[in-house]
Image: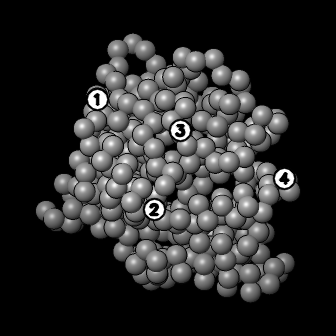
Amino acid sequence: MRADDAGVYRVSDDLALIQTVDFFTPIVDDPYMFGQIAAANALSDVYAMGGVPKTAMNLVAFPAKEMDLSVLREIVQGGIDKLKEAECVLIGGHSIEDKELKYGLSVTGFIHPARVLTKKTLQPGDRLVITKPLGTGIINTAIKAGLASEKITDFVTRLMAGLNRDAARIMADFPVHACTDVTGFGLAGHAFEMAKASGACLEIDIDAVPVMDGALEMYRKGMSTGSNDLNRRLVAADTVFSRKLPPWHEQIFYDPQTSGGLLVSIPEDRSQERIHALYDAGIVHAAQIGRVRPRSKGPFLSFR
């Protein structure tokens, strides 16, 4: 499958493999938590397509001449512990010496071919549900600049390390039409991908989108990430804001997420039921943030 969160290979009438790979440089100082976050991020693509992760392989680039191997052990242990939580088995991996530390995983999941979820099957009338708040990009920038409180730092670290497993399990109990996970392109970028692939229009309720404490304040103070401007340019021609917002407020919709939540399209008559199920499972930031409209000649993405 093209332009989706992972590749899908049909093995038989009742089994398909979901395969994905992701790795990046450290975004937190704690090696163990970096390993946890990298693993949760890699696993997320399998959950976004409705699958169950089964096996994984480590990908490591490590500056062995400049950094103590104990750092690498902590990173890998963080990844292993997150895989155990996901009931996914580490079966190997590959490492190279590099000047810049990088870590991630290649993950394989299982799914029934008839239950594969993609980005391109939005249905008019559906409601959009997101399962994690926005803001990890700008908060991580603030952490690196020494401007984030210990409370906010702890919150964003644990949020990024949190699996999308429970949200995906709950999703399997509902007639979901389309799904993706919100990562580097931000909410606007990933919502645009879904809308364009489906030939639909997405209307996002600005006030309904959950945002991390402190994120908007950082943008108001003039901070930004290295990806916001690019994310904005990628969707600018097909995005409209029907309400006048300060430029700093608009930035949150382009904020690049690490290990972000799932963005799910579900029939209107089941959306609130799913929200309640997510709350009951402890996914307290889940929110219904918009709807799917048939598209004529207007933009693919509208913020109202």
Considering depth in this image, is 233 or 282 the residue closer to the camera? 282
- How crowded pointer 2 is (Cα within 10 Å; few <14, some 14-19, many 20+) is rated as few
Residue at the spot 28% in from the left edge and 29% down from the top edge: 125
Q: Visible in this render: residue 109?
A: yes
Say whether disc 3 or disc 1 marks the residue closer to the N-terminus. 1
The secondary element bearing badge 2 is classed as loop
Residue at the spot 46% in from the left edge and 77% down from the top edge: 85
Residue at the spot 73% in from the left edge and 73% down from the top edge: 30
Amino acid on which disc 3 is placed: Val
- How crowded pointer 3 is (Cα within 10 Å; few <14, some 14-19, many 20+) is rated as many
Q: Which residue is mark 1?
A: 125
Q: Which quarter of the picture shows residue 233? A: top right
Q: Which residue is mark 3?
A: 209
Q: Which mark is residue 37?
A: none
The secondary element bearing badge 3 is classed as loop
Say whether disc 2 or disc 3 marks the residue closer to the N-terminus. 3
Q: What distance separates the C-alpha of mark 1 from that of mark 4? A: 42 Å
Q: Visible in this render: residue 8?
A: no
Is 157 located above or below residue 252 in the figure?
below
Q: Residue 176 location, x and y as percent? A: 28, 46
Q: Which mark is residue 282?
A: 2
Say whether disc 1 or disc 4 marks the residue closer to the N-terminus. 1
Q: What distance separates the C-alpha of mark 4 from that of mark 3? A: 24 Å
Q: Which mark is residue 147?
A: 4
Q: Residue 283 location, x and y as percent? A: 46, 58
In front: label 4 or label 2:
2
Residue at the spot 77% in from the left edge and 42% down from the top edge: 218
